[in-house]
Image (tube, rainbow, N blue to C red):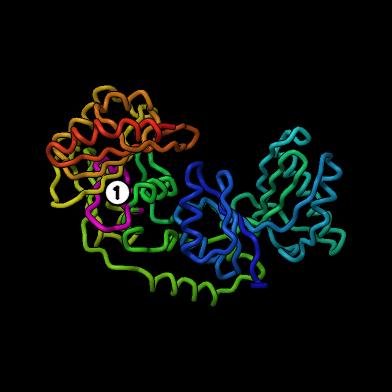
Amino acid sequence: MENNFKMIAKTFFGFEEILAKELRMLGAQEVEEGIRMVSFKGDKGFMYKANLSLRTALKILKPIYHFRANTDLALYKGISGINWSQYMNSNQTFVIDTTVHSDYFKHSQFVSQKSKDAIVDQFRNKTGQRPSVDKDYPDLRINIHIDKDQVSVALDTSGASLHQRGYKTATNIAPINEVLAAGMILLSGWEGQGDFLDPMCGSGTILAEAAMIACNIPANINRKEFAFEKWNDWDNDLFDQIMDSCLKKVREFHYTIKGYDKAPSAVQKAKDNIKNANLEEYVTVQEKNFFDTEKETKGPLHMVFNPPYGERLDIEMERFYREIGDTLKQNYPGTNAWFITANLEALKFVGLKPSRKIKLFNGSLEARLVKYEMYEGSKRTKFNSNNNEQITNNDD
């Protein structure tokens, strides 16, 4: 379609494939995976839908210009070559976010400053007035990416990172990023076709994301605003149509989603966040120590959790991870258990062989998302002995 334009969805390492799948299912055109990003094409309505619906995207960028520059002057001229009055007026505010991988430009702050000068000078020369910089609540957020001498300029359609869903008002000591949580759940294969448990739920992020996936609720339905709402071509009626269309695709859920945490404060925070997300009818949270629990439901159980790594919580790792393995082995037959950890050494003490290991990053920490399949009775031993080759192949 002639109204389609290119966009870039930014994501975490390891989520490129599932983000591309999300985009295709939404109806994106010309989807192509990159590193920590996926490019695609769509129209303005699809831009709104992508921001509302994508679970594994951190930002949606709209590229507007590309040029080469290896000097300060070339950078200034390139930015000046864009007609900025298409995107804002002199009474509005803007901010520039810059990422630099170049021998020609060493400091992102310098690039932002030089680019800001070019934009301000263009308005001042044309109108005698200039737009101001507002780092907190800009009308336009501009993204500049420099790779060697290649300069890409894009508009940030999202604003604040899309992991800021809008439902989380209370957090724990080591909260998990909402996009990371959603990506883990999608990688685990969860689609809402059974019971779900997060046995160390903290402030409830994994529970909320699992419930929204199960019910096909748009990921950012609770978000206060997107950057595109301040754009000159903002179409409120179109946005409402997209929102209504997304909500019509919400589906029934007939199983249970439960969370445990041994800390009363965490349980209360999780309950508050689940309430904020309007997910109370799907999710229950209880004060329990996972190591004292056993499987309560019949049929397969899907478990996803984020145990402590020892980074910010003072626990005895060897014993803690051994207890995870013992509890799964003794008390949770018929369970697919997935968890993420950046403490790769501690995995050795679980005492079970994972059927999958997926390399991810939790912030700057290299981590593994691991899967343990707990079979009923004697199948467990058979599974562990037969899957050595598969385990080796999946170990990053």
Q: Quadrant of residue 128?
A: bottom right
Task: Name the residue at 24% across, 42% down.
Answer: 199
Q: Quadrant of residue 89?
A: bottom right
Residue pointed to by mark 1:
270
Does the image show residue 273? no
Q: Is residue 29 magenta?
A: no
Q: Quadrant of residue 211?
A: bottom left
Secondary structure found at label 1: helix
Task: Name the residue at 46% across, 37% down.
Answer: 361
Residue 278 spot, x, y in % from top left: 32, 62
Against 226, residue 243 (above or below) is below
Residue 274 spot, x, y in % from top left: 31, 55
Residue 345 spot, x, y in % from top left: 36, 23
Crowding near the residue tagged with mark 1, few <14, some 14–19, many ≥20 C-alpha atoms within 10 Å: many
| Magenta span | 190-209
Does the image show residue 199? yes
Where does the C terminus fall, quadrant-wise? top left
Residue 366 spot, x, y in % from top left: 46, 32
Task: Name the residue at 26% across, 58% down.
Answer: 193
